[in-house]
Amino acid sequence: MNILHMKYAVEVARVGSLSQAAQNLILAQPNLSRSIKELEAEIGIKIFERSTKGMLLTPEGEEFIGYAKEILNHIDHVDKIYKTGAAKKQKFSISVPRACYISEAFAEFTKSIPDTQVEIFYKETNSQRTISNILNSDYKLGIIRYAENYDKYFKSMLEEKELVYEMIAEFSYRLIMSRDCPLAQKENITFDDLEDYIRIAHADPYVPSLSMAKVVREELPDNVKRCIYIFERASQFDLLSKNNQTFMWVSPAPEDVLEKYNLVQRKCESNTKIYKDILIYKNGYKLTELDKKFITELCLSRRRNLK
């Protein structure tokens, strides 16, 4: 399809007159009329009705002109970017598990955002949604978390979906609780010690193919009678700091976060399971400068906090 003819048709539709459009386009009227007829023949519809009142759009023509305007706007945008040297908008997008060391890395990363057009998307979610965001949405990076015993399952799935994966961190879960919690006074905490307390947990399953209930039983002991499931991190800190009967399993948390919410962090000698945080992205995707800056901050935060 001739883009120039499309531009002519849009101008005719705007002014409703061949003669006025020809004048605006600095084009002979017979040549303009011939161009419109050639366009109509090419797309197989009648765009205009010729009348004494001027050039009137047909219903099909009105629809076509709407599409034509969108196409021409996109072309103008491309011209501005690549011909006039206008700045191209930079984008960064990532889906991650809810983890303090990752959010700390993200906060540090935002300090280096360039003084140009930038859009940044940061979503905290479960592994299943993270993989879906990369495969089906416009997210470029993701971090998934799983227990070491699921390593073979996840690697096989990621390879099948043609996703690149790199290990970011490996750790054992810690317990966090209020400084006023009786558990905070214990030097050695066991699973049995937790039985009468309230567990705070994120309600997302860790393994996509398993139900949440089964995952909870397999991932951590289910001897705790009371559990509160939440979906975002703000509530967890309010609950932990205000209710000294609550605790939570987390990846090692930064000291400043613990201080802010009057929390303490403890190891559990009964919990020896290892977890992995894995960076993923589509095979063939080329990391941008923003991606590389975030990964650098992520590695620095891991060294500071996951000792």
Image: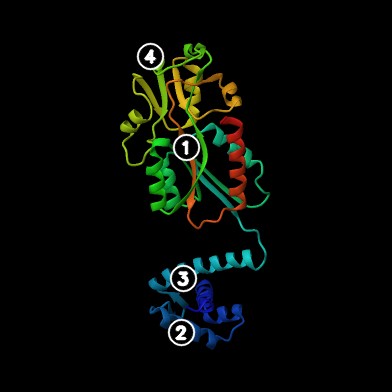
Specify the quadrant of the image occupied by residue 56.
bottom left
Mark nearest the camera among 1 and 3 is 1
The answer to whether residue 47 is above or below residue 274 is below
Residue 96 is at least partly visible in this image: no
Rounded to the nearest angstrom, the CA distance separating label 3 from label 2 is 15 Å
Q: Which mark is residue 276?
A: 1
For mark 1, does the 10 Å Cα neighbourhood hold few (<14), some (14 to 19), or many (20 or more) residues? many
Describe the element under mark 2 as helix, strand or loop. helix
Q: Which mark is residue 196?
A: 4
Q: Earlier in the sequence, mark 3 or mark 4?
A: 3
Mark nearest the camera among 2 and 1 is 1
Q: Which mark is residue 38?
A: 2
Q: Residue furthest bottom?
A: 30
The answer to whether residue 13 is above or below residue 198 is below
Mark nearest the camera among 4 and 2 is 4
Number of residue marks: 4
